[in-house]
Amino acid sequence: MNDFASPNAYGVLTAPDVFVIQRLLPGPIDRVWSYIVDSELRAKWMAAGKLDLTVGSLAELVWRNDELTNPPGQRPQGFSAEHRMQTRVNEVDPPRKLSISWGGRGDVSFELAPSGEEVLLTVVHRRLPDRASLLLVGPGWHTHLNLLAARLSGAAPEPYWDSWSRLRGEYERRLPA
């Protein structure tokens, strides 16, 4: 395992508008895939929303970050209790890859690769329009993937908003201005 995929590893920019973050997760691959594509399981670490795994299909993802951990932590000013986003399925290769549009803020792919009894998950968020978006996406993906890792391993996660706020400051220092 490299530092890029280790627990709590920071995401990086691989191009000015491409953010990549990885996690090595408890397998098998079909189990991790289900946490990405199944609305009920995805709602435990990111956002609910039924996905039709057909290229071109539309879906709505619904975030309720206050419900992801108990306690949720202190929600930052300016964030609502619920966020909805329209998305479109761009590519599907079960159980290895899902690519979706990201509500006008680029495209996201979830790529899975077996690694022994674990699974390497690579999230690539492309076409990010500006640094302000990066400073939402970086700590967001980092916090959501930490939560996914906790759910898959049975560990107790850090309160969502406390983690996001702490990581936002770190990403502000790490990502170029």
Image: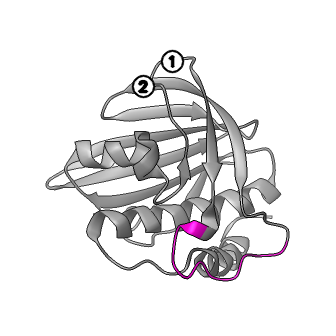
The residue identified by callout 2 is 92
Label 2 element class: strand
Numbered badge on residue 55: 1
Any part of residue 78 in sight: yes
Placement of 79 over or under 55, stated as above or below: below
Horizontal arrangement in the rendering, residue 43 relative to residue 66 (left or right): left
Q: Residue 112 at what x, y percent from top left? A: 33, 43
Label 1 element class: loop
What type is the residue that disc 2 sits on? Answer: Val
Residue located 54% across and 80% down the image: 159
| Circle nearer the N terminus (1, 2) | 1
Horizontal arrangement in the rendering, residue 107 relative to residue 81 (left or right): left
Is residue 69 part of the magenta span, yes or no?
Answer: yes
Circle 2 crowding by C-alpha within 10 Å: few under 14, some 14–19, many from 20: some
Any part of residue 122 in sight: no
- The reply to whether the C-beta atoms of the residues labelled 1 and 2 are less than 8 Å apart is yes
Residue 111: quarter of image: top left
How is the structure coloured here? one colour
Q: Residue 82 at what x, y percent from top left? A: 71, 57
Residue located 42% across and 25% down the image: 92
Q: How many marks?
A: 2
Residue located 48% across and 25% down the image: 52
Placement of 2 over or under 106, stated as above or below: below
Residue located 55% across and 82% down the image: 71
Circle 1 crowding by C-alpha within 10 Å: few under 14, some 14–19, many from 20: some
Q: Main secondary structure of the magenta part?
A: loop
Which residue range is magenta in the image? 67-77
Is residue 2 part of the magenta span, yes or no?
Answer: no
Residue 106: quarter of image: top right
Q: Residue 51 at what x, y percent from top left? A: 50, 32
What type is the residue that disc 1 sits on? Answer: Val
Q: Residue 175 at what x, y percent from top left? A: 69, 65
